[in-house]
Amino acid sequence: MSEQNFEIPDKPEPANYAAAVSLEERLRDDNRGELDPQLEGSGTFVDNGWDRWHWLISPGSKGPGVLTLQLTMAQHLTWWKRIEVSTSLFGSWFNIRRLETANSTKTATVDLTAIDAQSGTLKLDFWKAGPFNIGSYVATLVIDVPSHLGKNVQFLCSRDSYTQP
């Protein structure tokens, strides 16, 4: 057998446990959703052959310090849709509001202020009715509250089955 010599460093580099960015910066840059936290205009954020969800940003009617979130489902849909609205406190997400539509109720709206979203960031979890009426997860978006104050952010579900156009 050959003998191998390994060099052992005299002193290892000290560990650096400091975070490169603050938690608030990481939450603002969280890209788990498919959209940038600063939504603009309109577009589609889910179109997977089964579900189709869109967003539309318009000027709000409640004043410059209010963000209005609106969930709307197309007239031909009947099964429930839901948005779970969460804010971040101390590194954890806490549910603060829920928007739901079902059957003949086609629109749900909630008004939020900067105080409601303590961290300035909201996480929106989109759900729909699934088999046996059990919730079926659709998507998650993270949005920046300060850049959306004074606006109406509408989310529309236009399709929830592959059998629909």
Image (spheres, helix red, strand yellow):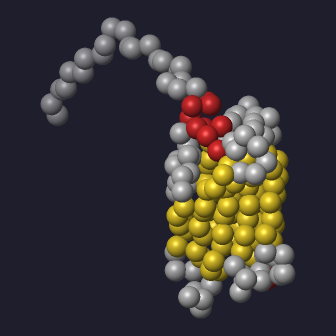
Kindly give the residue lying farthest to the bottom in the view shown.
163
User: Can I make out residue 95 in this image?
Assistant: no
Residue at 75% over, 76% down = 129
- Which one is in front, 15 or 77? 77
Q: Which quarter of the rendered picture does the N terminus lie within?
A: top left
Snapshot quadrant of residue 30: top right
Name the spot of residue 98 as percent of width and height, x first: 81, 58
Kindly give the residue lying farthest to the left in the view shown.
2
User: Can I make out residue 79 in this image?
Assistant: yes
Kindly give the residue lying farthest to the top in the view shown.
10
Residue at 62% over, 80% down = 159
Left or right, 87 with respect to 22, comes to right
Residue at 81% over, 65% down = 108
Residue at 52% over, 49% down = 36
Q: Is residue 91 above or below residue 155?
A: above
Name the spot of residue 145 as percent of width and height, x first: 67, 41
Q: Which quarter of the rendered picture does the C terminus lie within?
A: bottom right
- Which one is in front, 89 or 146? 146
Snapshot quadrant of residue 87: top right
Q: Is residue 84 above or below residue 30?
A: below
Name the spot of residue 68 as percent of width and height, x first: 75, 52
Q: Is residue 120 above or below residue 84?
A: above
Name the spot of residue 79 as percent of width and height, x first: 77, 80
